[in-house]
Amino acid sequence: TLLPLVSPLSDEGKGLMSIKSAFSNVVNELHDWDDVHNGDHCSWRGVSCDKSFSVVSLNLSNLNLGGSISPSVGDLKNLQAIDLKGNQLTGQIPDEIGNCGDLRTLDLSENLLYGDIPFSISKLKQLEDLILKNNQLTGPIPSTLSQLPNLKTLDLARNQLTGDIPRLIYWNEVLQYLGLRGNFLTGTLSPDMCQLTGLWYFDVRANNLTGTIPDNIGNCTSFEILDISYNQITGEIPYNIGFLQVATLSLQGNRLTGKIPEVIGLMQALAVLDLSENELVGPIPPILGNLSYTGKLYLHSNKLTGSIPPELGNMSNLSYLQLNDNQLVGRIPAELGRLGELFELNLANNYLEGPIPQNISSCTALNQLNVYGNRLNGSIPSGFQNLESLTALNLSSNNFRGRIPVELGRIVNLDKLDLSSNDFSGPIPASVGDLEHLLKLNLSRNCLDGPVPAEFGNLRSVQHIDMSFNKLSGKIPVELGQLQNLNTLILRNNNLRGEIPVQLTNCLSLLTLDISHNNFSGELPPTKLFSRFPPESFSGNPLLCGNWLGSLCETYPHGPK
Amino acid sequence: LVLMMSRRRLSGPGSSPPTCRIKCGRCTPCKAVHVPIQPGVSVPLEYYPEAWRCKCHNKLFMP
């Protein structure tokens, strides 16, 4: 008689083996899924069973599994949770997944799955969490997802889904989280969205939605986060928005027109208000100063006019204030100096005038200050040395004058310093050499005189130095040869003289050198490094010799004469 | 009528941070804080959306 060769494995064990056979990279991660040596499938990695040895959950997240999801998953009828996130799974989501009628959680996020979202998912009446974000899924969002009465989380972010957001999805009082960012969804926002009475997270950022913000938007009173940024939404921000209870209101990157509604100043629950990159006009409502709990206020890249309301100084929790790229006029209000939490202040590219108020020096948390491209004047406030956290200071393209204060060297965390295109005069203080973290230094297009400080040799990290179009005199200090990270040195249009120090050839990272239009003399260091620079780097120095055509002491003839 | 009364919008526009006094169970002090919500794999330099939560020591509670 024949001995039975059938393995004692149950049907569910066989289903799991078949799931394994569709995966790759199983040798390392699923070696205990082995029907020959271990028939107890409930003990296999990532498998959990109920009392009757039926598989209830499958957790194989972040195991670098490749291959695809086998249709055999549909044989595991008692599955309540599938978590395959963070693998390299490809192929389509099998229709058979609709047979797992007890499924509560389905997380297939962060894989390479493609194809449509199967309609069969709408058979999963127990489903609470459907998380398919970060895949390559295409096609529409099935409107039948509205037939899932228990769905709490629907996260389809960062796929390639197309078509409209099905209106029926909005008629779900249980749904708490709707994540659709980063797809190719079209159509408009429906007034029905406020039927989501249990929803706190609404995110359709970065799609192709058009139309206006629904007039009844304020009815979405359960929303904590409303992110409709980076679409093509047009029209005005409705007054009704003031009834929202949101902590985050992200409307940036659309084509919104009209004024900023005053009513937004009453939305004190706002932690983040982002209206940037739209076509908003009119003034910044002073009532926004009421938002004393707001940490981030972004109004940049609009067409806002009028002056900066001093009331913004009342926003005591503000850490980011970006008003750049508008048409703002008037002075920088001294009241901004009361913003003790302020981390980033960007007022660039407006029509602001007058000096930077001394009080700004009280913003000791300030990390980035950018006033580029205004009509500001006066000198750098001496109190700036208190801004010890500052890493980026950009005062470029204004009408600032006076000397560069010695105290600037005390802002030791600076990595970018741009004072270019102003009327600064006098010598460059040696203390600038104390800025040992400096990566980029731009002092070009001022009226600076005196020598290049030898202390610049201490700028260990510096990559980019531009001091062109000044009245600098003296020699290039030999200490610049210590700058191992320097890739750009621009000294053109000054009154520098003497020989090019041979030590400069130690700057092995140097890719761009421009010392043209000075009074340099002698021969160029005859090294490989210098031969890579074009003749234009040296032109306008009549007493300088090199191997370019017409040079004083041309050593290599360029063709027949 | 009760349903209508419970709608905050009848009291006019505007909002305020949650009052957290009794939201942390027995834990004190209970304070309202901003919490970043990670919306999946995020692009660097993008800020996360923020929501309000009630915080007591290291524990967060729903407002």
Image (tube, grey):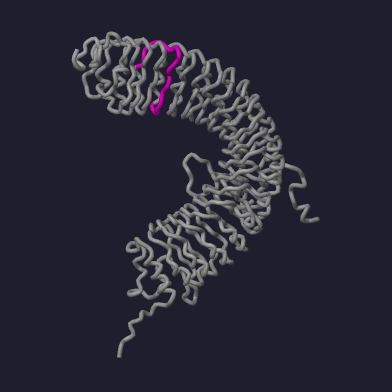
In the displayed structure image, the side of residue A548 where residue A23 appears, left or right? right
Task: Please report the bounds of the magenta region as a residue range.
Answer: A436-453
Residue visible at 76% across and 43% down in the picture: B12
Is residue A57 inside the magenta stretch?
no
Frontmost residue, A146 versus A512: A146
Is residue A452 inside the magenta stretch?
yes
In the displayed structure image, the side of residue A358 where residue A458 appears, left or right? left
Q: Quadrant of the C terminus of chain A?
A: top left
Location of residue A283 by image quarter: top right
Residue occupying the far bottom of the picture:
A1
Chief secondary structure of the magenta span? loop
From this view, report whether residue A107 is shown above or below residue A9: above
From this view, report whether residue B13 is shown above or below residue A431: below
In the displayed structure image, the side of residue A515 where residue A264 appears, left or right? right
From this view, report whether residue B56 is shown above or below residue A149: above
Q: Quadrant of the N terminus of chain A?
A: bottom left
Frontmost residue, B4 versus A268: B4
Image coords of residue A181 (percent x, y): 54, 48
Image coords of residue A152 (percent x, y): 59, 58
Residue visible at 40% across and 66% down in the picture: A45
Residue visible at 46% across and 65% down in the picture: A58
